[in-house]
Amino acid sequence: MAGENAFQVEGVVVSALSNGTWRVELANGHQVVAFAPARVKAAAAGLAPGHKVKLQMSPYDLSEGRIISETKSN
C-alpha cells in the first residue's frame, strides 16, 4: 500500500473492532476498516469513537486503509 498511487483521506472513528482495527467513516459516507502499523500502534491504542484520523488508502482496495496519524480537532 506504500506505493506511489496511495492517497490520504481523513475520517472519523465509528467503532473499535478486534485485533487493533477500527471502523472509520470517511467524509463521503463510506465506511472502511482501518489498521495501525507498528510505528503508530502505541499512539492508536487510545483511539475511541469520534476521534478524527488521517488514513492512507490504495486505489486498488478501497475497503481498507492504514492509520497514519490522529488529527487534532479544534
Image: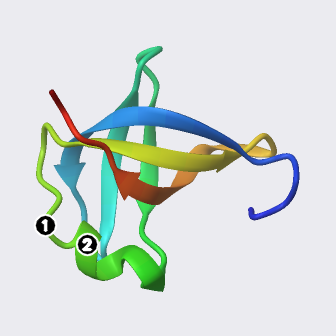
33 or 50, which lies in front? 50
Outermost residue toward the front in this view: 74
30 or 71, which lies in front? 71
Q: Quadrant of residue 72?
A: top left
Q: Are marks 1 and 2 in contact (CB under 8 Å)?
A: yes
The answer to whether residue 64 is left or right of residue 16 is: right
Outermost residue toward the right in this view: 4
**For mark 1, what is the residue?**
46
The answer to whether residue 50 is left or right of residue 1 is: left
- Amino acid type at mark 1: Gly
Residue at 11%, 53% (x, y): give it.
48
69 or 34, which lies in front? 69
SS at mark 2 in the image = helix
**For mark 2, what is the residue?**
43
- Regarding residue 43, the answer to whether it shows in the image is yes
- Regarding residue 18, the answer to whether it shows in the image is no
Q: Which corner quadrant holds the C terminus?
A: top left
Please give the count of numbered marks on the rendered protein: 2
Residue 32: give x, y in percent of width and height.
46, 41
Residue 60: give x, y in percent of width and height.
81, 45
Residue at 27%, 68% (x, y): give it.
44
Cα–Cα span, label 1 and label 2 = 6 Å
Q: Quadrant of residue 49?
A: top left
6 above or below 1? above
